[in-house]
Amino acid sequence: MGAAGSSALARLGLPAPPGPRWLGVAALGLAAVALGAVAWRRSRPGRRRRLQQVGTVSELWIYPVKSCKGVSVDAAECTALGLRSGHLRDRFWLVIKEDGHMVTGRQEPRLVLVSITYEDDCLILRAPGMDQLVLPTKLHSSNKLHDCRVFGLDIQGRDCGDEAAQWFTSFLKTDAFRLVQFEKSMKARTSHEIFPSLDKKYQVAYPDCSPVMILSEASLTDLNTRMEKKVKIDNFRPNIVVTGCSAFEEDTWDELLIGNVEMKKILACPRCIMTTVDPDTGVIDRKEPLETLKSYRLCDPSEKSIYKSSPLFGIYYSVEKIGSLKVGDPVYQMVL
């Protein structure tokens, strides 16, 4: 990826210990390795590869509204457009200005204070000082369609109504905002549009670059050994958190099998000022943890045309085979 890939990244504005819930499942890891390898080889007889367990899923996260708080789930479907749990879809909702331009925590850091739960086919949004907003996940077809702009690319969204618009406008207090929802019948953003010279074929709704982002607990622990003020996994918003591997081992993983889902590495995740928004206060620092990451996580000089001065933390993946996965699943690398 050369100048085209570099300009694509330029559009993006780029310059917790394991929980007890997965321990019981992880205890079955040895048996799952053998059974998983047999099942996988039978399902993919044409590819002579072996499975090497590189870790275990410790957390799964879905971020329904871009830049708002994530929802932790124990299990999820992995679709071509990312994780799904019932009607909860990853980054299928987006705050926009009235002209259709996206609004994220980079411009409105207090968005990270909006929490989301899911009840009776509705999203329940809560924020400090606000009454809760009940948002149906199925919108009426008469709701207006907006032409939106996400990192300079066109994509549509269906308006979620005046109540939702007023709720976000009242909470953020800086402009007039609307909330839109992506629908499967809409044209998604393609990998060719996001990275014109990238030899991958996938689509996304409102995520930055890819359907899935993976980060290891060990990488976060390593970063925190260098930080005066510790940061949380929430600063980095991964979909899949992996335990049982060494720090930054995920940099070396190419094709993965988790549950019955197959994924392929796209590229490392170049980090921006979004990581400097405190997930507990909604205050943007614009320095940490970005400056610390820059001190030791810059790319190899040969890749500078791609990543420039952005530090790398986490890995973007495309979904090669849809399926389901859960906390406690072994993470296998598919190797020759």
Image (cartoon, rainbow, N blue to C red):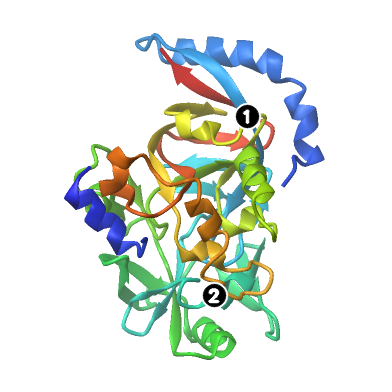
Q: Residue, x 44% and y 16% (percent of image)?
A: 335
Q: Secondary structure at mark 2?
A: helix
Total of numbered circles in the picture? 2
Q: Earlier in the sequence, mark 2 or mark 1?
A: 2
Q: Is residue 320 visible?
A: no
* 185 left or right, relative to 211: left
* 150 left or right, relative to 279: left
Residue 281 vs residue 260, the one in the foreground:
281
Q: Secondary structure at mark 1?
A: loop
Tell me the crowding category of disc 2: few under 14, some 14 to 19, or many 20 or more residues within 10 angstroms, Cα based: many
Residue 102 spot, x, y in % from top left:
38, 73
Residue 91 spot, x, y in % from top left:
48, 59
Q: Residue, x 63% and y 68% (percent of image)?
A: 278
Please tell me in which quadrant of the rendered image residue 63 appears.
bottom right
Q: Residue, x 55% and y 47% (percent of image)?
A: 239
Quarter of the picture holding the N terminus: top left
Name the residue that disc number 1 marks.
245
Name the residue that disc number 2 marks.
109
Q: Residue, x 25% and y 48% (percent of image)?
A: 305
Name the amino acid type tagged 2.
Answer: Pro
Please tell me in which quadrant of the rendered image residue 159 appears.
bottom left
